[in-house]
Amino acid sequence: MTGWPGRLGFDMIELEFSEQIAALRATFDDIRSVIDIDRLRTDIADLNEQAGAPDLWDDSDHAQKVTSQLSHRQSELARIVSIESRLDDLEVLVELANAEGDQESADEATAELASITKVLGDLEVHTLLNGEFDVRPAVITIRSGAGGVDAADFAEMLLRMYLRWAEQHNYPVQVLDVGYAEEAGIKSATIQVDAPYAFGTLSVEAGTHRLVRMSPFNSAGKRQTSFAAVEVVPLIEQTESIEVPENDIRVDVFRSSGPGGQSVNTTDSAVRITHLPTGTVVSCQNEKSQIQNRAAAMRVLQSRLLLLQREQEAATKKELAGVITASWGDQMRSYVLAPYQMVKDLRTNYEVNNPGQVFDGDLDGFIAAGIRWRKQAPQG
């Protein structure tokens, strides 16, 4: 965005935003064509009819799905209508500022132009989420890697980062399982983010994250590099669940526990399921009963197996096409706290110089850059 020229005379103001507004309208028209407003209104009418059915809540899972989809589509339509109205109002505000030499209106128009530009940028990124499972909720698993205690502490920092990100967006989130390390931090953790397009949004966070800092666990205060892996899978619909034969799994039950060995439950309600053919392991201990934990763990296991199946199919296609090198490197982001302050995504080159803010959940810039990069990356 170019700066506005300011005053041409003592009480004369001239804002020249015509090019910026025209560019915003062009972007808005592209977004409208992708979203398909007519289809959106049809979906809302259909979901409204379903939501009004007298027997809707006879099936609570179906009812929650209908009401959630209705709320999401209504919000999407309201956002589109609001942007169109704001663009019209912005043009009027610019005319008013120019006609009356009103500094307050000029400042308001400048701020509104910046605000609409950001909103449209966010919405444009949203339209890129058109993958098969992008609309689904997400299951995120964080595992500490090389780096000893520092890696376990780093994994816990990443867990907090994603929880804070979800909180800032008012997304419901559940901590399904946490495995605490002996000295500090965590060995692994699994969380579920229940929001439309959570998987499409967060899938760009998958990969190896690296932390460089002066170790708080090293008496010599030496610089330490540690690693953590982030896995993101879509939460599949129960109707799409992959069949998992009982003979293919081993189910272990154990007592839920928190840091320091403090007992959370007095019964063996936590569940660990191992898928023997693939070695995939899923644990869940957040529910009160063993039955609930088993059901939640099975759903996550099926989600992982479905994604694994898709990845194997995609790998086969790439091999047949002669593309062997993966498009995503193992190490995708570096968090540097010493000797300087920086967080940099190695795929997109997007970087910021405030790691504390990032660890506090400010991830939207990295996520948007990742979604755009993924859309532009060569496909195998």
Image (cartoon, rainbow, N blue to C red):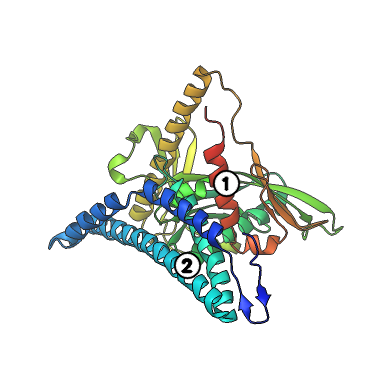
> Left or right: where does residue 1 sit relative to residue 99?
right
Q: Residue furthest right?
A: 220
Q: Looking at the picture, which amino acid does disc 2 mark?
A: Glu
Q: Position of residue 248 (x, y in %)?
A: 39, 32
Mark 2, other Cα within 10 Å: few <14 / some 14–19 / many ≥20: some
With respect to residue 54, does 280 lie above or below?
Answer: above
Of the pair 29 and 137, the residue shown nearer to us: 29
Report which quarter residue 213 is drawn in. Answer: bottom right
Report which quarter residue 292 is drawn in. Answer: bottom left
Mark 1, other Cα within 10 Å: few <14 / some 14–19 / many ≥20: many
Of the pair 71 and 270, the residue shown nearer to us: 71
Report which quarter residue 114 is drawn in. Answer: bottom right
Q: Residue furthest left?
A: 54
> Left or right: where does residue 357 sit relative to residue 251?
right
With respect to residue 187, does 167 lie above or below?
Answer: below
Q: Quadrant of the N terminus?
A: bottom right
Q: Residue at x 76, y 48 (%)?
A: 225
Mark 2 or mark 1: which comes first in sequence? 2
Label 2: which residue?
91
Q: Looking at the picture, which amino acid does disc 1 mark?
A: Gly
Q: Position of residue 39 (x, y in %)?
A: 28, 49
Label 1: which residue?
370
Contact (Cβ within 8 Å) of mark 2 with mark 1: no
- Does any portion of residue 253 appear in the rendered image? no
Q: Residue at x 55, y 38 (%)?
A: 376
Q: Position of residue 346 (x, y in %)?
A: 68, 43
